[in-house]
Amino acid sequence: MDKKSPIKITLTERDGAVTITQWVYETLRGAVMNGQILPGRSLTIRELATLLDVSPMPIREALRQLSAEKALEIQGNRRVMVPKMTAMKFTELYEARIAIESHAAARALPYIDKARFMRLRSLDQLINIAQEENNLEQISILNQNFHRLLYTANPHQVTLPLIESLWLQLGPFMRLATSKLEEHYLIDRHNEAMTAIENQDAFALQLAITADIREGIAFAGTPELLHSFIEQSHMAAH
Amino acid sequence: MDKKSPIKITLTERDGAVTITQWVYETLRGAVMNGQILPGRSLTIRELATLLDVSPMPIREALRQLSAEKALEIQGNRRVMVPKMTAMKFTELYEARIAIESHAAARALPYIDKARFMRLRSLDQLINIAQEENNLEQISILNQNFHRLLYTANPHQVTLPLIESLWLQLGPFMRLATSKLEEHYLIDRHNEAMTAIENQDAFALQLAITADIREGIAFAGTPELLHSFIEQSHMAAH
DNA sequence: AACTATATTTTGTGATCACAAAGAACAATA
DNA sequence: TATTGTTCTTTGTGATCACAAAATATAGTT
């Protein structure tokens, strides 16, 4: 038996209009984001090629792109792995999220029209429903959609790619976090955001977004949970 | 004759220890950063391959990486080009710079030790000299080094790649800007930054960095110059 | 049993080729 | 002259191969 931990990647139907490289990229991206590959696990081109049943070439391209987005990391050996996490890096990633996303929200505010406002509201309601059902997976997805829908109001996008990079780096550990979270009570900061938008109050919107991000991982801020992150990371190394 | 504008890329010696792909990446990155390729100019793999005298393969890899970093842009035709600029996007890039870099500075502050402080000061002095000589090219480079040296004090780096991406996107237009600037008087905000560091005053440091960035492109904020950017971009399209 | 030296396998890198789709050049028609 | 239809060329994509370096397994030695 191989000592490497097995990789289970959820395969989606490949749209014929899209290139193989693009499909591989999206597939691997999803696998990293959903924590399907353990941090520290080193990936080989040929392994992924046989796993996804494509030639090595599209794998190479996708790996390079994901590395550039910091979703993967190129080691000195030129081998690629899911980056390990430390408690301090985790904190830095979240503080960066707050700084950039509150900025992006304020910059998007003037561009939010009626239609987008309605879509934001309905997303908020879906989140409330998922919250009552305690469907953490769904909450996480919808929450991400809410943030993205907010920032993309700004037609001159420069921040979203940066934000998505941060999400990618946090992705594997979000799942770890939410999986350990049972009774996490989420204050609905989205309501505060919605009223801030209605009033065109940029500062209030920034406060709401900041609070939303900070509270969304308050539970993960405990030393015990962060320590379990690090352990997980180091386990995969051996 | 070909209608395409010629590309003059400064070739550097290739270190044998480094992969061809890496060398190509750095070379193309420098070319984009220095505005040696006109925005809107579409690049082909084979053209660059013959230009740099390598096989198409390293070019492909480098182009994909640069596209992921938003230094290049993949069009619908799957062709790659230097992104065009608009006045609004220019503003968004700079506001993003201010938001992220002031945050990065504050996050780096607690980690700045004596040795780094001295290096920052000597860089500041070099900038002063370059300023007296009115050597704009040198000022730009040293200024970038100053900022990078400041942010990298933080050993848990997550923001620098994001910041470098913004620099890359602004790169081509910085040269345009500085080339039109003759009597640009730069207030020495670095001194303010240095005293803020001495006092461990995060807020003052943020103010200094913000002012430094904002004043560094105040001249570019005039509608006339921004308009010339857009023209330049559109000229290369035809 | 622990360490070192050797042999074998695996891996990333880069070159080359085939091919379909996009682009350009050109001819024919209105 | 402007425009459409048709060739011919160029281009990105993806597959396959060669090779050197790294990793792993194996044998040899103390």
Image (tube, coloured by chain):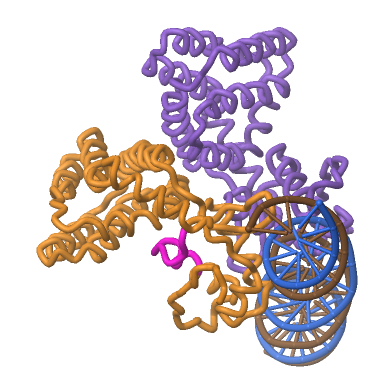
Chain colours: A orange, B purple, C brown, D blue
Across and down, in percent, residue B60 comes to 72, 62
Residue D28 in the image: above or below residue D4:
above
A98 or B141, which is in the foreground? A98
Residue A236 in the image: above or below residue A87:
below
> Which residue sits at x=26%, y=37%?
A206
Judge whether residue A33 is colored magenta. Answer: yes
- State the quadrant of the C terminus of chain B: bottom right
A48 or A28, which is in the foreground? A48
Q: Quadrant of residue A107?
A: top left
Q: Is residue A222 left or right of residue B124?
A: left
Q: Is residue A128 left or right of residue B223?
A: left
Judge whether residue A111 is colored magenta. Answer: no
Residue B135 in the image: above or below residue A180:
above
C6 or A15, which is in the foreground? C6
Across and down, in percent, residue B61 comes to 70, 60
Q: Quadrant of residue A55?
A: bottom right
Residue extending furthest left? A132
Residue B152 in the image: above or below residue A101:
above
B53 or D24, which is in the foreground? D24
- State the quadrant of the N terminus of chain B: bottom right
Q: Is residue B3 left or right of residue B176?
A: right
Magenta stretch bounds: A28-38
> Which residue sits at x=48%, y=7%?
B195
> Which residue sits at x=67%, y=21%?
B142
